[in-house]
Amino acid sequence: MDGHQIVTASFGGQFYQLSAWVKADEMGIDMTLMNELGANMGELSFRDGSVSFSTPLLPKFIGGEYIVADFQFCFYNAPALAQALKDCGLSFIDTENSRRILQEKNLIIEIEKSRNLVKLVNHSRGYAYTLEGDFE
């Protein structure tokens, strides 16, 4: 993946909207966050198992590790995710247009996907966001 995305997020009654340039491949993930004028509002890098994340936009408790994990849940290889989550005691259900992560019968994360939109809801942490872009 190498392209522009529009991110709309909600957490604790706060709403955020920004643009992101995302480059993700087998080597890692790089994201540049921008406001509507194109000014840099933060950067995230995930390489060799290490996350670097800085932004004045989001609360400090929203760590880059959560963003990387959510990105992986949305886009990474389903069998590999299923195995990694199984090793953590979680279930992973993948269909053509959705993904679900459960702990026993409790829905933790719900992801709906289409060609141009991905919506993630984290029920256990109380946040949601949508990503708009070309995901094919």
Image (spheres, rainbow, N blue to C red):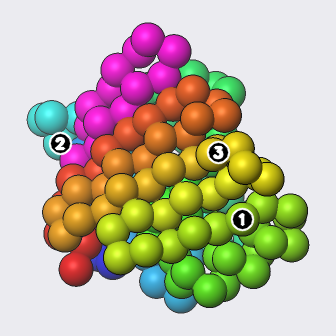
| Residue assigned mark 1 | 91
| Residue assigned mark 2 | 38
In the foreground, 96 or 46:
96
Tell me what residue is drawn at x 66 percent, y 84 percent: 80
Q: Quadrant of the N terminus?
A: bottom left
Above or below 110: residue 94: below
Q: Is residue 9 magenta?
A: yes
Above or below 67: residue 10: above
- Asked if one can make out residue 58 in the rendered structure from this viewpoint, the answer is yes
Tell me what residue is drawn at x 13 percent, y 35 percent: 37
Above or below 115: residue 101: above
> Dot 3: few (<14), some (14–19), or many (≥20) neighbours within 10 Å?
some
Q: Position of residue 133 (x, y in %)?
A: 19, 61
Q: Position of residue 91 (x, y in %)?
A: 72, 65
Relative placement, left or right, of 14 versus 91 is left
Tell me what residue is drawn at x 55 percent, y 59 percent: 100
Q: Position of residue 121 (x, y in %)?
A: 47, 41
Which mark is in front, 1 or 2?
A: 1
Q: What span is colored magenta in the figure? A: 3-18
Tell me what residue is drawn at x 36 percent, y 56 percent: 112
| Residue assigned mark 3 | 108
In whole angstroms, how far apart are the C-alphas of marks 3 and 2? 34 Å
Relative placement, left or right, of 57 versus 28 is left
Residue type highlighted by circle 1: Ser
In the foreground, 7 or 73:
73
Residue type highlighted by circle 2: Gly
Secondary structure under tag 1 reads: strand
Secondary structure under tag 3 reads: strand
Q: Are marks 3 and 2 in contact (CB under 8 Å)?
A: no
What secondary structure characterizes most of the magenta part?
Answer: strand
In whole angstroms, how far apart are the C-alphas of marks 1 and 2? 39 Å
